[in-house]
Image (cartoon, rainbow, N blue to C red):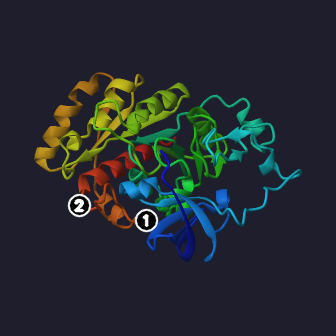
Amino acid sequence: MVRWRSGTVTALRRRWAGAVELDVDLPDGSTMRALAYPHLVGTPEPGDRVLLNAGALLMGLGTGGYAHVVALPDRLPPDPPQAGDTRDAGHLVKARYTPLQPILLGVDEEASPHRSVLETADDLGGLPVVTADLHSALPAILAGVRADAPTARVAYVLTDGGALPAWFSRTLAGLREHLVGTVSVGQAFGGDLEATTLHTGLLAARHVLHADVAVVAQGPGNLGTGTRWGFSGVAVGEAVNAIATLGGRPVGSLRISAADARPRHQGVSHHSLTAYGRVALAPAELVVPDGLDPGLAAEVDAALAPLAARHRIVRVATDGLDAALRSSAVPLSTMGRGLDGDHAYFLAAAAAGRHATTLLG
């Protein structure tokens, strides 16, 4: 349940698109690191009293290790614009029936300028769509796309398995100039466009953002219990089904690692094997990078062999991908490991991005 705290803002720290870090002094004399989303609660200033949800910070979660500002009770933000502003004409409620539910304009709603386009849209027209388990794969996939197709228009479809606000991701903030846009789908929100479902989000990426390539992945903060089915990345398999249903080309970015200490994530992670092997009913192109350590390569081949009956296993050359990864617009990090700490993971994601460019019409 919620662990509530109340305190006073003493300092503002880093800012990025849609978020601000701050220090909050508590009545017991301690200080908490907190995060506020100005679009939801207003912009905190030193001296403001804030109400905090401190659960994630007190639990010591790595990704969600902030107290989150729930309200500035003594200085509430103004109401959103009224009549005449289409942003206030939306009816999409996300993070539904929670205290901070935002009401947003859906990309296909009646008041949306894109309504006429999406009202009849029903096909992705062969759009290559890379699916990934973790948010950390996004910049590596983008690096792989840019290595061979530097002018390709890449859209990000943010699913709701991790952080719901797009604003939480510093990675996404750093990639804004390198993407044609972000579509937040399901309960996720804060993207350039809002969609009710993954299907609508994919169609918006194709027909509104005019993407050449799309990437589908959850936000930061994958949830997992260490069991076969208890992880939010299982939605990757459902994404494959949605992409295929709409006439897209699913490209699987496999979670491959020789560095993860947990046996279930060594070689090909059980997340990928379950999502693609059990959940995805439509075929995808699963990308394996060349140049893996021989022992790791053999382990990957053995793990993927049962999936070859449904999916196409694609070998992709990796010449130039290491340089592309090292030139990433944002730092690469997964589970606290950088590029050199988990090279195979990032190389596999970049190879998936590279393969997607070979499917461009």
- Counting from the top left corner in percent of width and height, residue 161 is at 46, 41
Which residue is the site of mark 1? 330
Q: Mark 1 to mark 2: distance in Å?
A: 16 Å
Secondary structure found at label 2: loop
**Dot placed on the residue nearer the N-terminal end, 1 or 2:** 1
Q: Quick one: which residue is furthest to the left in this view?
A: 295
Which residue is the site of mark 2? 341
For the residues bearing labels 1 and 2, Cβ distance under 8 angstroms:
no
Question: Which residue type carries mark 1?
Answer: Val
Residue 17: which disc?
A: none
Q: Nearer the viewer, residue 333 or 316?
A: 333
Q: Nearer the viewer, residue 59 or 280?
A: 59
356 left or right of 256?
right
- Counting from the top left corner in percent of width and height, residue 251 is at 41, 38
- The image shows residue 283, relative to residue 128, as above or below, that is above
Question: Which residue type carries mark 2?
Answer: Gly
- Counting from the top left corner in percent of width and height, residue 177 is at 56, 63
Secondary structure found at label 1: loop
- Which residue appears at 45% of the width and 31% of the height? 240
340 left or right of 104?
left
